[in-house]
Image (spheres, rainbow, N blue to C red):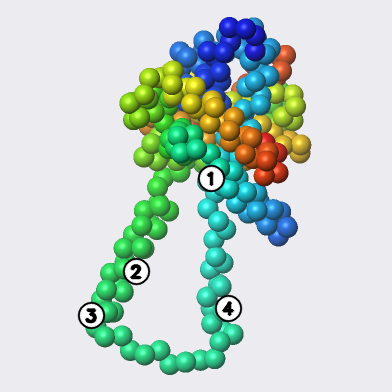
Amino acid sequence: MTTGCEQRLGDLGAHALGGLGPDETAELERHLDACPGCRTELAGLVPLPGLLGLAAEAPSPVPADLRPRTLAGLPRRRRPGLPAAAALVLVAALGAGTIVALDDGTRPVVELALPAGEDRPVHGEAGLQQVASGVRIELALSGLRPAEQGYYHAWLTRDGRRVSAGTFVGDPDGEAVARLQCGGDLDAYDELLVTWHGRDAEEVVAVQQPIRD
Amino acid sequence: MVEAGDGVADAADRVVAAATVRAALQRLGDDHRRILELAYDRGLSQREIAHALALPLGTVKSRTYYALRAFRLACEELGVKP
């Protein structure tokens, strides 16, 4: 970052979170090509969406067999009968919970296998899911370059135009699980794209995968 | 997500790291935490956030940047390396 770049700081934060529009993204990327200082500043921000994703992780689910295992260790006791009204309330409550769970579990997810190519060592899988605020993207990738060398940027493309989903970095083993989000409708997008941005290198396409056959 | 084959220790580490990062988020001011929630958890664009909060776009961008900086600092203070 050099003098005069202060007003770009906001763009860098927004870029790391995938919140800039296509034109703003293109303009910032032109600037990044010419400004090593801003590239360094951005490199300090790109791991943060990964940590936000970690914070958003639900605590580990209770094992499904915990209840029978626990009950098996308890002395048997006859369950008192429920009055009819209470039983009805219980059924209603259970019913509602079931519907919520089903609703969550049945949202369509597009799963993509991402095989390595001749010039593309990055491989893994992606899940794309329509949610209320856009398209949630989960990437599980291997074969990544380490964070010290640069960062990755995930996009969805629509008629050849990129829409930013956010950035992430590889861990020392060259792996990453990234949870990102992109605005808009999943149906409108054509492909998933991941680009690599080295510290002093041109952009390289790391993953390019059509969303539909 | 913990991959199949990961050891129990890895899973436990991840749960602890997630709890620590959540604690780091709690250290942020309300404005910073709110803007990260809108930008990351809800996936809103900067323009959508500006509209939702009735703030100028420039203010939203600068607040997002400083919120990320504050979050990184809080993580570092709690021993989580970004």
Dot 4 corresponds to which residue? A69
Q: Earlier in the sequence, mark 4 or mark 2?
A: 4
The 10 Å Cα crowd at callout 4, few under 14, some 14 to 19, many 20 or more, is few
Residue A147 image point, x, y percent: 72, 29
Q: Tell me whether circle 4 and circle 1 mark residues in contact (CB < 8 Å).
A: no
Q: Tell me which chain the residue with mark 1 is part of.
A: B
Task: Identify which residue is drawn at 69% across, 34% down.
Answer: A170
- Tell me residue A130's x, y (percent): 41, 39
Question: From mark 4 to mark 2, how far is it between C-alphas?
Answer: 22 Å
Q: Which residue is mark 1?
A: B26
Q: Are marks 4 and 3 on the same chain?
A: yes
Residue B32 located left or right of residue A140: left
Camera-near label (3 vs 2) is 3
User: Are the residues flagged by discs 3 and 2 from a single subunit?
Assistant: yes
Q: Which residue is mark 2?
A: A94
Indicate the amino acid at tag 3: Ala
Q: Mark 1, mark 2: which one is toward the viewer?
A: 1
